[in-house]
């Protein structure tokens, strides 16, 4: 019955549809064919692949996206306050609109998003990055202080403007050193089609590590870490959507009520600073349908490992015996993540009395590997290229980030740790036509428009094998391969035909990550490890792409924020103490 419903409403290539719960693997299409598959069908519980006005899950959003003509506007005010998300006690918290985590930014695919950010903190600048947003022709809204803007000084405001050219789940966070670990973070949802059907959208479900010291304190310990380059301090707790009990039992669990027979879409987002998390709902398989902003061929899993910055949208079928079930978010110790407590939430069917679950966990996997079955819904092969001759070596070393400063623990890409000058962003060099970028900006040019960039990121051997979640701004890159040890072209397994595509993928501990992306987005785009301590310690570089075609931010606002920042910085109590990112 559901099947005919679906088929009747959606004219997509769904003739091989077997059941309403699973959108089947589509026949393989080339990029060109894909553009002809959009249809006029309407989105609904049984036709989530559809959207409207000729756009659908089949739309190639690199080339085409709706322009709704609608503008959604948000005001985000950042204040220095306190919070107590797990009952352990109040601590400093940099809140957004008086909330931790911050409010959800929600728009529809194709909308223009306008966000006015007001910095009402006393002692920090800020810049807000809209994680995963392509920023097509709007690099000035990418929110990376020292690269795309000067930080916003205390008391100043700035308007970010961008179009939601893709759909799905993401988050926003500050890029001012490790500030987002203290609270400047929130979810972002762009409504659009999906590759699996569901009845109810539960919205974002954020997962993160939580520390009883502030992020700036932990970061300082990590940078000064003289104990033989030892690991950073462990987190104290994990939060699920901003809450959990603490190890001593105070605080409260997040609670979700579900109805038997309904299918729920849950938007999982890892907003951690340093911990890989594995999640599971007892007795309920999760049907995974996205990786970051990319719809995938849906598959079922018991446990899902999520690295920092990554998102997975899943569908949960409430078809078990009505009862209370644990939702678990465990620290992935096999990924060398360390935290003193795991998190739980309680999911209850609406027909029973909500109470403490007695449900049992699925067996937790013990190997730290990113999910391997993330084939994009629309297959997009990548032209074969070579990775052999230009590795970017990720090294752990010690260096001075400043003249006359301490020797610090730093990460480096090819012996150079990124270290931006907040008052002199890369965009200023570009506007001035000054191509003498200092080495510490780690500027790497991309190939010309339309051609493909192939990069091998290689961990230097002999270091602690920490996995690094590598995030690229301005693109969803293609993950051509991942492996342990040193990349060997004669044995490496590369996937050119159905590579996963996303904006954050893991460089395996002591291993390599081979990525590809076409030059099609003018701007300067940060590639960095999303472990807050690691980018603070320099693990990043920027790709300068099609500089002749960059659309610059409005000059007046750009100059004003830089002037205000320079005036503030001269007398600021706290100084920059790290890469600035
Ligand atoms: C927040 O307030 C505390 C206490 O007044 C102060 O020490 C700290 O520097 C402030 N932080 C920011 C980012 O404004
Ligand atoms: C930001 O504020 C925190 C205190 O809340 C302080 O520890 C840190 O040094 C400040 N950073 C900068 C660069 O202002
Ligand atoms: C998690 O929190 C966000 C924002 O506060 C809210 O919109 C969402 O509904 C919550 N998710 C669940 C599953 O409760
Ligand atoms: C978030 O990502 C970090 C680092 O990649 C990881 O250690 C942690 O387990 C992840 N958290 C969740 C809930 O998946
Ligand atoms: C519940 O739903 C899952 C996922 O759709 C399915 O695999 C399973 O067979 C269903 N179980 C029952 C008891 O219907
Ligand atoms: C990194 O260093 C290697 C070895 O010296 C070199 O081949 C490669 O081109 C460098 N990569 C970048 C991005 O500069
Ligand atoms: C990595 O850093 C160490 C310590 O500074 C240095 O001896 C080594 O040459 C570096 N290796 C590479 C490949 O850059
Ligand atoms: C270009 O930038 C460099 C590094 O900041 C600076 O030393 C130099 O004066 C600049 N050149 C011009 C022509 O502005
Ligand atoms: Cu890292």
Image (cartoon, rainbow, N blue to C red):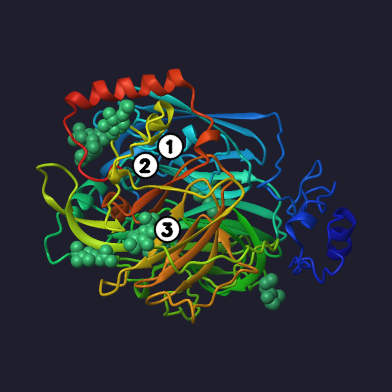
Q: Is residue 394 left or right of residue 366?
A: left
Judging from the image, what secondary structure is the residue with disc 3 in? Answer: strand
278, 165: nearer the viewer: 165
Towards the viewer: 283 or 463: 463
Q: Is mark 2 within 8 Å of ligand 2?
A: no
Q: Which residue carries the number 3 mark?
A: 470
Element carrying mark 2: loop
Q: Secondary structure at mark 1?
A: loop
Q: Nearer the viewer, residue 126 or 380?
A: 380
Rounded to the nearest whole Å, what is the CA distance between mark 3 and mark 2?
15 Å
- Residue 384 in the image: x percent, y percent? 60, 66
Marks 1 and 2 sit apart, C-alpha to C-alpha, by: 7 Å
Nearer mark to the viewer, of 3 and 2: 3
Q: Earlier in the sequence, mark 3 or mark 1?
A: 1
Q: Is residue 88 left or right of residue 95?
A: left
Q: Earlier in the sequence, mark 3 or mark 2?
A: 2
Measuring 44% from the left and 17% from the top, which residue is drawn there?
A: 556
Q: Which residue is mark 2?
A: 175
Q: Which residue is depicted at the point 31% across and 21% down?
A: 564
Task: Please say whether residue 547 is visible from this viewpoint.
Answer: yes
Contact? badges 1 and 2 (CB < 8 Å): yes
- Seen in the picture, residue 45 relative to 466 is either above or below; the reply is above
Indicate yes or no: mark 3 CB to ligand 9 under 8 Å: yes
Q: Tell me: residue 355, above or below residue 525.
A: below
Q: Is residue 243 visible?
A: no
């Amino acid at each position: 019955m559901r099947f005919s419903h679906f088929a009747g409403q959606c004219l997509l290539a769904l003739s091989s549809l077997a059941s309403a719960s699973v959108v089947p693997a589509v026949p393989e299409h080339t990029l060109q064919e894909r553009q002809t598959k959009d249809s006029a069908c309407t989105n609904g519980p049984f036709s989530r692949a559809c959207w409207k006005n000729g756009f659908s899950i089949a739309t190639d959003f690199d080339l085409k996206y709706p322009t709704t003509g609608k503008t959604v506007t948000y005001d985000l005010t950042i204040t220095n306050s306190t919070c107590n998300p797990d009952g352990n006690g109040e601590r400093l918290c940099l809140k957004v609109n008086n909330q931790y985590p911050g409010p959800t930014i929600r728009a529809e695919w194709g909308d223009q998003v306008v966000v006015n950010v007001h910095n009402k903190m006393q002692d920090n600048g800020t810049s807000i990055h809209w994680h995963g947003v392509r920023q097509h022709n709007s690099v000035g809204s990418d929110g990376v202080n020292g690269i795309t803007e000067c930080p916003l000084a205390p008391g100043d405001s700035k308007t970010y403007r961008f179009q939601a050219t893709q759909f799905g789940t993401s988050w926003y966070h500050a890029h001012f050193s490790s500030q987002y670990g203290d609270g400047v973070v929130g979810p972002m949802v762009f409504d659009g089609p999906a590759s699996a059907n569901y009845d109810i959208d539960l919205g974002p479900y954020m997962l993160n590590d939580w520390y009883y010291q502030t992020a700036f304190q932990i970061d300082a310990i990590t940078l000064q870490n003289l104990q033989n380059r030892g690991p950073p301090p462990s987190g104290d707790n994990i939060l699920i959507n901003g809450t959990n009990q603490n190890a001593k039992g105070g605080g409260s669990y997040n609670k979700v009520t579900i109805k038997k027979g309904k299918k729920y879409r849950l938007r999982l987002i890892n907003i951690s600073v340093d911990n890989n998390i594995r999640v599971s709902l007892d007795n309920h398989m999760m049907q995974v349908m996205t990786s970051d902003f990319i719809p995938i061929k849906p598959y079922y899993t018991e446990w899902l490992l999520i690295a920092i910055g990554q998102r997975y949208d899943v569908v949960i079928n409430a078809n078990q015996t009505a009862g209370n079930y644990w939702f678990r978010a465990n620290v992935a110790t096999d990924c060398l993540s360390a935290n003193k407590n795991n998190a739980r939430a309680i999911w209850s069917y609406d027909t029973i009395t909500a109470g403490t679950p007695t449900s049992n966990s699925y067996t937790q996997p013990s190997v730290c590997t990113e999910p391997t079955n993330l084939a994009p819904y629309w297959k997009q092969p990548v032209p074969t290229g070579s990775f052999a001759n230009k590795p970017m070596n990720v090294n752990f070393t010690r260096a001075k980030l400043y003249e006359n400063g301490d020797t610090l623990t730093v990460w480096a890409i090819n012996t150079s740790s990124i270290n931006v000058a907040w008052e002199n962003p890369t965009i200023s060099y570009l506007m001035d036509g000054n191509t003498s970028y200092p080495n510490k900006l780690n500027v790497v040019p991309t190939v010309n428009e339309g051609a493909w960039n192939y990069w091998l990121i290689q961990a230097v051997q002999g270091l602690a094998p920490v996995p690094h979640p590598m995030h690229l701004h301005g693109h969803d890159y293609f993950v051509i391969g991942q492996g342990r040890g040193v990349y060997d072209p004669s044995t490496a397994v590369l996937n050119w035909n159905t590579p996963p595509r996303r904006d954050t993928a893991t460089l395996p501990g002591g291993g390599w990550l081979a990525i590809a992306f076409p030059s099609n987005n003018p701007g300067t785009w940060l590639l960095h490890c999303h472990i807050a301590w690691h980018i603070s310690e320099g693990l990043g570089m920027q790709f300068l792409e099609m500089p002749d075609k960059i659309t610059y931010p409005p000059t007046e606002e750009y100059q004003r924020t830089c002037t205000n920042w320079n005036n503030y910085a001269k007398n600021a109590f706290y100084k920059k103490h790290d890469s600035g990112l």
